[in-house]
Image (cartoon, coloured by chain):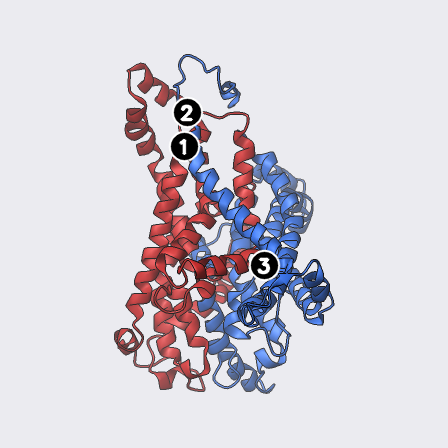
């Protein structure tokens, strides 16, 4: 389709303008290059230094000792475990429910477009607001709505953030991201071949069979893309934890992002925080490599 | 006969669809409702569904918390960073869409890949650079960060919109002797304007709701609404009705923008991998 444009830089066809592209593309490339390279190289450099801002004179080359110290810190492993639990749970919830909701919202029903607007609304609420609505008005152990409901049912009030801190954070993040999953999967489902579904229905296929053998395989790639994008975002969930639990109680909701934040801006341990930061970069890159492959395949230039 | 199961199916899907929408929207509804209560009613048990609504929270919020200076920060930072990103992105997207070279695809993919760098990975150096350049808690500082984090998405989206502009139209203008400048400003940009506008809208939404850099790099002077709302998390700040009023005002414009730009959101945030 765009193959006519596949000309070499120097031999343009006569109807093409002579436009030098470098001054046009250059600024974007340069600022992004600086944004990407400079902090990353600095993180790498800091991670090899003994550098604590509380004690700035005591600055020396550390070699790999920051990494060794970091890897033997139990808090790091707890935070990595918490990160995996958080990412995994929210992925399962948003993709599972998101698929069901996408199938539901793909059906014609009365007032569907308004219902869909309401359903996707949580995604546009800023994270700090989402976290506080849940923390105060819904999950508060005394005055919250959930406490009122569980007490009315005779179960007594649950102190969500004290008793089930991780579950509480998972619920909040899932509520924020379920609409995103719904939007993506609904877009994907709408490109499904209706005739194929109709033909299967004519042949007497039950709805469940249609979902299992036609819709789900069709959604495969969208689900993969969704899972990878969500993973990259979820690896660094921060605001929700910052506002609700501050990583606690203890380390119960400290994920890798919050661990690095505590190290850097509370203990001012620049070296250790940088080493942990690089660890986060590596984790994200493992996912990013697969995601970029799919993006590259879909990009026609 | 055949119509009956169809009707029954429709009743079922309507009920389920509205139930799902109701559950998902409920926390927002509850917050907006609380914003019209007094502080005493806001924490009342049993919760009050019916009450004498008051606008007091909305009128007092600025007296007590300086709400509008935070809102102004949000507007200036998100609009400023979006305009800056567009300024960088439109020429780049133009060059890549209409004058592709063998490096174009690689460049685009590389730009998108910068989005995948986790912000905590560079928190320490950015914080120190900002401290040394006195950019901490300044609007300029946060604007620069948001421009950079949104730039890849903005370039990518405008690129796809430019690719959708029919080549024949540009060709025709060229035949009539239009200069490059005329071609761009009188033909291309008007055609691509809806796409550019919705890209801008998406960038504003993303900047407005961003809460990692704003929480870490601002405190008071340049704090946008995300940081301001976070200050309600302290125990002494448990004014639910006021918090609800502030939150309702903070999310209302973005909710409307979001509803307007759902399609672009899917396109932009999946980099075209889901169609």
Residue B102 locus on image (x, y percent): 55, 25
- Pointers 3 and 1 in contact (C-beta within 8 Å): no
Task: Give whichever of B162, B29 is nearer the camera.
Answer: B162
Report the residue marked by disc 2: A20
Badge 1 crowding class, 10 Å Cα cut-off, few under 14, some 14 to 19, many 20 or more, is: some
Q: Is residue A126 visible?
A: no
| Side of A61 where B220 appears, left or right | left
Residue A135 locus on image (x, y percent): 50, 75
At x 36%, y 68%, the residue is: B248
Q: According to the rendering, which colour does chain A have?
A: blue
Task: For marks 3 and 2, give the one nearer the viewer.
Answer: 2
Badge 2 crowding class, 10 Å Cα cut-off, few under 14, some 14 to 19, many 20 or more, is: few
- Pointers 1 and 2 in contact (C-beta within 8 Å): yes
Decide which of tag 3 and tag 2 comes sooner along the chain. Answer: 2
Report the residue marked by disc 3: A234
Q: Kindly identify which chain the residue marked by label 2 belongs to.
A: A
Task: Give whichever of A64, A188 is nearer the camera.
Answer: A64
Residue B70 locus on image (x, y percent): 33, 66
* Extreme-top residue of the structure: A14
- Which secondary structure lies at badge 3? helix
Number of numbered discs visible in the structure rendering? 3
Q: Do labels 1 and 2 share a chain?
A: yes
Label number found at residue A24: 1
């Amino acid at each position: 389709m765009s193959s006519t444009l596949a000309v070499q830089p120097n031999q343009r066809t006569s109807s093409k303008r002579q436009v030098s592209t470098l001054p046009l593309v250059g600024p974007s490339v340069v600022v992004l290059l600086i944004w990407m390279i400079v902090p990353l190289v600095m993180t790498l450099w800091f991670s090899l230094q003994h550098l604590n801002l509380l004690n700035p004179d005591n600055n020396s080359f550390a070699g790999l000792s920051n990494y060794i110290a970091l890897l033997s810190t139990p808090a790091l492993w707890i935070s990595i475990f918490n990160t995996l639990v958080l990412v995994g749970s929210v992925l399962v919830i948003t993709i599972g429910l998101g698929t069901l909701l996408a199938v539901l919202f793909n059906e014609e029903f009365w007032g569907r477009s308004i219902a869909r607007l309401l359903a996707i609304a949580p995604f546009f609420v800023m994270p700090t607001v989402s976290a506080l609505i849940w923390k105060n008005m819904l999950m508060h152990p005394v005055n919250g709505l959930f406490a009122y409901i569980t007490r009315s049912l005779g179960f007594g009030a649950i102190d969500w953030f004290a008793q089930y801190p991780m579950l509480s954070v998972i619920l909040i993040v899932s509520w924020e991201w379920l609409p995103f999953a719904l939007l993506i999967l609904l877009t994907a489902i709408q490109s499904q071949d209706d005739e194929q579904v109709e033909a299967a229905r004519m042949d007497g296929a039950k709805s469940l069979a249609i979902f299992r053998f036609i819709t789900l395989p069709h959604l495969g790639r969208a689900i993969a893309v969704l899972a990878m994008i969500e993973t990259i975002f979820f690896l660094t969930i921060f605001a929700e934890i910052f506002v609700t639990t501050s990583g606690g109680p203890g380390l119960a909701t400290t994920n890798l992002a919050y661990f690095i934040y505590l190290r850097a801006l509370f203990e001012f341990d620049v070296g250790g925080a940088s080493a942990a930061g690089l660890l986060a970069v590596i984790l994200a890159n493992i996912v990013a490599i697969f995601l970029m492959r799919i993006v590259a395949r879909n990009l026609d230039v | 006969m055949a119509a009956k199961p169809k009707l029954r199916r429709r009743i079922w899907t309507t009920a389920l669809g509205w139930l799902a929408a109701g559950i998902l929207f409920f926390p927002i509804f509850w917050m907006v409702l609380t914003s019209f209560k007094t502080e005493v009613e806001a924490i009342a048990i049993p919760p009050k569904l019916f009450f004498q609504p008051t606008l007091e929270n909305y009128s007092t919020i600025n007296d007590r918390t300086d709400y509008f200076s935070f809102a102004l920060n949000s507007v200036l930072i998100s609009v400023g960073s979006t305009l800056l990103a567009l300024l960088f992105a439109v020429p780049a997207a133009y060059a890549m869409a209409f004058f592709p070279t063998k490096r174009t695809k690689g460049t685009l993919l590389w730009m998108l890949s910068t989005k995948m760098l986790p912000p905590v990975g560079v928190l320490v150096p950015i914080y120190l650079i900002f401290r040394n350049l006195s950019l901490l808690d300044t609007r300029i500082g946060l604007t620069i960060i948001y421009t950079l984090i949104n730039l890849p998405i903005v370039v990518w989206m405008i690129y796809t919109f430019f690719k959708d502009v029919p080549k024949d139209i540009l060709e025709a203008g060229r035949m009539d002797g239009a200069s490059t400048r005329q071609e761009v400003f009188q033909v291309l940009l008007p055609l691509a304007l809806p796409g550019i506008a919705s890209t801008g809208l998406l960038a504003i939404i993303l900047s407005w709701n961003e809460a990692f850099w704003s929480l870490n790099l601002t405190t008071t002077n340049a704090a946008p609404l995300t940081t301001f709302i976070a200050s309600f998390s302290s125990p002494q700040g448990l004014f639910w009705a006021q918090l609800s009023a502030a939150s309702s005002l903070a999310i209302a414009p973005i909710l409307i923008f979001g509803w307007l730009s759902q399609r672009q959101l899917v396109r932009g945030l999946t980099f075209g991998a889901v169609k």
